[in-house]
């Protein structure tokens, strides 16, 4: 089967990581993969280099910010590529790419499958515009794959009523994300954490939706209740001044309790150094960081967005979205938990990801859907 994949870019992000894993996995199973991105560049682009069976092509040629002219140019470029390369099916993800994909496919005979990666009921104008325009074409789309049950329900509410639909959770590389004593020691020594410190980490890009402000507010409250707590913000972006100012305002001379850590393509070496993973997001379908942290043997404290509660199950605590006090209480409860229980939760977390959210399961489910829908 010849599969076309379409994303906006290959910067470090959840959807981008998943599509790279999908491309590599499908190529490894003998499929031909044409990977299209609207913009060139991105740290994850290197993960596609020299992989047999994968061809990567940038539609626009710039690194971003081209606006609607860039979108229209991308539609024309993709339509020409679909006609010349002739994939059996085109799988797109995120609202702008979904719209570009369905517009470009018209008249080519290539069936389109949309990917939904969010369960947020309210979106910003940049996402809302392609979402609203795109739903006018939903009935011409062959199928829809959501990475969460909640995301599928929300997409139906937006009018994404396609011929077929399936929920396929994200796949986590359990060989890459794993407990590792050497990585743990290196991380904690580098950032000055002692054996009695309970390190709580939030991993994610600098975005309002990732909940940095909520995390910092909860950390400020929790630090006053338990002196063993320490906190880490791991981000692929440069921490902005506003976040640093928020932290100093909340903890004052105790601001040394927080570390800002650059987490890019080797974030797997950071997870083992934490004791608890915190996800404070306000709207996601399947938070990748939750699955990655669990695979690394971490219990999870998370806000109740998308399918987070289903993913975490009994391997952590899920609190109401936006509830600072509940998030802070969860941090304190974990810090006061018996060490044996913390370790047991970590082992159960990894086992749950291995059993239910592996990359192999992602590949099998996606391959089955694309194979069936290309022939319908």
Image: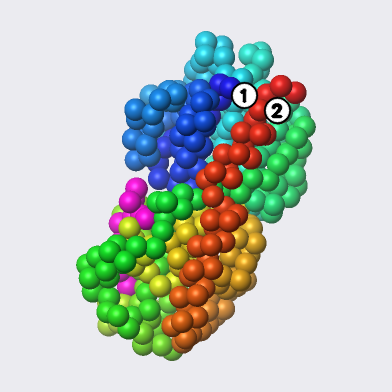
Residue 330 position, x and y percent, is 53, 79
Tell me what residue is drawn at x 58 percent, y 32 percent: 92
Question: Circle 2 — which element?
Answer: helix
Residue 113 bears which disc, if any? none
Tell me what residue is drawn at x 42 percent, y 55 percent: 177
Apparent side of residue 371 relative to residue 236 in the rendered image (left or right)? right
From mark 2 to mark 1, how far is it between C-alphas?
A: 8 Å
Instruction: Mark 1: give few (<14), some (14-19) or many (20+) Cα within 10 Å.
Output: many
Apparent side of residue 313 relative to residue 69 in the rendered image (left or right)? right
Q: Residue furthest top?
A: 84
What's drawn in magenta, residue-wise? 258-268
Apparent side of residue 231 relative to residue 20 in the rendered image (left or right)? left
Q: How many marks?
A: 2
Apparent side of residue 181 relative to residue 89 in the rendered image (left or right)? left
Residue 43 position, x and y percent, is 34, 40
> Which corner quadrant holds the N terminus?
top right
Q: Which residue is mark 2?
A: 373
Name which quarter of the figure residue 113 lies in. Answer: top right
Residue 247 position, x and y percent, is 36, 73
In this rendered view, identify the residue nearer to me: 216 or 334. Answer: 334
Above or below residue 356? Residue 144 is: above
**Is residue 372 visible in the rendered structure shown here?**
yes
Residue 89 bears which disc, if any? 1
Above or below residue 215? Residue 76 is: above
Indicate whether residue 338 is drawn in magenta: no
Indicate whether residue 265 is drawn in magenta: yes
Q: Find out whether the residues at labels 2 and 1 contact each other: C-beta distance under 8 Å.
A: yes
Instruction: Mark 2: give few (<14), some (14-19) or many (20+) Cα within 10 Å.
Output: some
In this rendered view, identify the residue nearer to me: 155 or 318. Answer: 318
Above or below residue 261? Residue 15 is: above
């Amino acid at each position: 089967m010849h599969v076309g994949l379409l994303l906006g870019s290959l910067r470090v992000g959840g959807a981008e990581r998943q599509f790279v894993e999908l491309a590599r996995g499908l190529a490894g199973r003998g499929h031909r993969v044409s990977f299209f991105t609207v913009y060139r560049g991105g740290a994850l682009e290197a993960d596609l280099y020299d992989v047999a069976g994968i061809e990567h092509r940038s539609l626009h040629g710039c690194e971003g910010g081209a606006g609607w002219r860039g979108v229209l140019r991308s539609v024309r470029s993709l339509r020409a590529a679909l006609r010349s390369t002739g994939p059996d099916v085109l799988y797109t993800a995120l609202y702008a790419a979904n719209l570009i994909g369905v517009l470009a496919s018209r008249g080519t005979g290539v069936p389109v499958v949309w990917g939904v990666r969010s369960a947020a009921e309210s979106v910003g104008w940049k996402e809302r515009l392609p979402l609203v325009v795109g739903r006018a074409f939903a009935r011409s789309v062959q199928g829809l794959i959501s990475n969460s049950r909640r995301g599928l329900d929300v997409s139906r509410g937006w009018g994404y009523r396609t011929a077929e639909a399936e929920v396929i959770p994200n796949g986590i590389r359990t060989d890459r994300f794993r407990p590792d004593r050497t990585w743990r020691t290196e991380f904690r020594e580098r950032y000055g954490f002692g054996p009695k410190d309970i390190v709580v980490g939030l991993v994610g890009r600098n975005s309002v939706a990732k909940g940095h402000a909520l995390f910092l507010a909860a950390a400020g409250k929790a630090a006053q209740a338990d002196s063993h707590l320490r906190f880490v913000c791991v981000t692929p972006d440069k921490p902005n001044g506003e976040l640093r100012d928020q932290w100093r305002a909340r903890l004052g001379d105790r601001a040394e309790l927080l570390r800002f850590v650059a987490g890019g393509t080797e974030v797997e070496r950071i997870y083992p150094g934490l004791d608890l993973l915190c996800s404070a997001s306000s709207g996601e379908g399947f938070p990748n960081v939750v699955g990655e942290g669990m695979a690394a043997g971490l219990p999870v404290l998370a806000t109740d967005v998308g399918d987070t509660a289903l993913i975490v199950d009994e391997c952590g605590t899920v609190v109401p979205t936006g509830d600072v006090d509940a998030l802070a209480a969860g941090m304190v409860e974990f810090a006061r938990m018996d060490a044996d229980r913390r370790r047991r939760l970590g082992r159960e977390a990894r086992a749950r990801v291995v059993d239910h959210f592996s990359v192999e399961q992602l590949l099998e489910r996606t391959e089955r859907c694309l194979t069936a829908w290309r022939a319908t």
